[in-house]
Image (tube, rainbow, N blue to C red):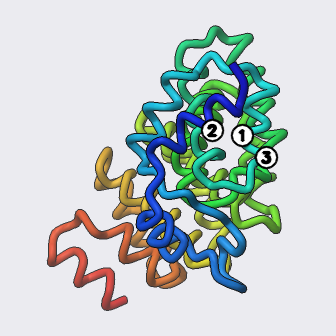
Amino acid sequence: MTYKTVQKELRKYASKERAETNAWFFKTGKGQYGEGDKFIGVSNPDARKVAIKYQDLDFKEIKNLLDSKIHEDRFVGLEILVARYEGADIKEKKKIVDFYLKNKKQVNNWDLVDTSASYILGDYLFDKDRSILYKLAKSKSLWDRRIAVVSTHFFIKQKDFKDIFALTQILLKDKEDLMHKAIGWMLREVGKKDEKQLTKFLDTHTKVLPRTTLRYAIERLSSVERSKYMRR
């Protein structure tokens, strides 16, 4: 079983129409964040089916998938890692995390980050030193910074909000819209778990948050609360 076996299986689900739509949706044009990325048009549910089927693929073959120019190959490679991680013991989990970080350059679009970061890195760091997230947050790479933020989703689910609040403050001047959205998404997730903690943070930081971040963060608040924060 090699990466070529996986690619062959994946291409059974390819759609030219979806490939064209995805190329537009994931901003692959010149100067856009996904410039040069290539799609064959496989839906995420179909890609995940392939990943589950081949989750025993060894690391060398997974790396070949991650090194592919085809977006869906990389997506499946990451989904295989997630599936492997879920069933792994602590020694294997560390091996997967190290592999993930070593190959993070290939986690180079927002869906690739979102399908992997919290499930691998976030889970692993929950009871460990999290300084790697702060290092990633200061990276020049948009995708490194998004990995840092999205990884906190695992912590947020456990009602641990300190890192997303700290990272938000570090990234207040980030110029990338994808970061504004990611931070707003995580803040919204805080609100799902503890609305008082979210509003306490917003009361202090609303005026300095990017407007996109604020809009995402307050989506689940009452209309009265939303209006109050948007007027500030």
**Which residue has dot 3 on it?**
67
Which kind of residue does numbered mark 2 sit on? Gln
Left or right position of 56 against 189: right
Q: Quadrant of residue 159?
A: top left
C-alpha span from label 1 to label 3: 5 Å
Residue 7 marker: 2
Residue 6 x/y as whole percent: 61, 32
Whether 29 is drawn above or below 165: the answer is: below
**Which residue has dot 1 on it?**
65
Which kind of residue does numbered mark 1 sit on? Leu
Secondary structure beneath label 2: helix
Q: Quadrant of residue 167?
A: bottom right
Left or right position of 106 against 80: right
Residue 36 marker: none
Instruction: Please report the residue visible at 24 percent of the width from the left and 63 percent of the height from the top.
Output: 220
Q: Nearer the viewer, residue 98 or 203?
A: 98
Instruction: Please report the residue visible at 49 percent of the width from the left and 24 percent of the height from the top.
Output: 52
Instruction: Please report the residue visible at 63 percent of the width from the left and 45 percent of the height from the top.
Output: 73
Instruction: Please report the residue visible at 55 percent of the width from the left and 57 percent of the height from the top.
Output: 40
> Residues at badges 1 and 3 in contact (C-beta under 8 Å)?
yes
Residue 21 x/y as whole percent: 44, 71
Secondary structure beneath label 1: helix
Q: Quadrant of residue 100?
A: top right
Which residue in the rendered view is the most extreme toward the bottom? 231
* Crowding at mark 2 (Cα within 10 Å: few <14, some 14-19, many 20+): some
Whether 149 is drawn above or below 38: the answer is: above
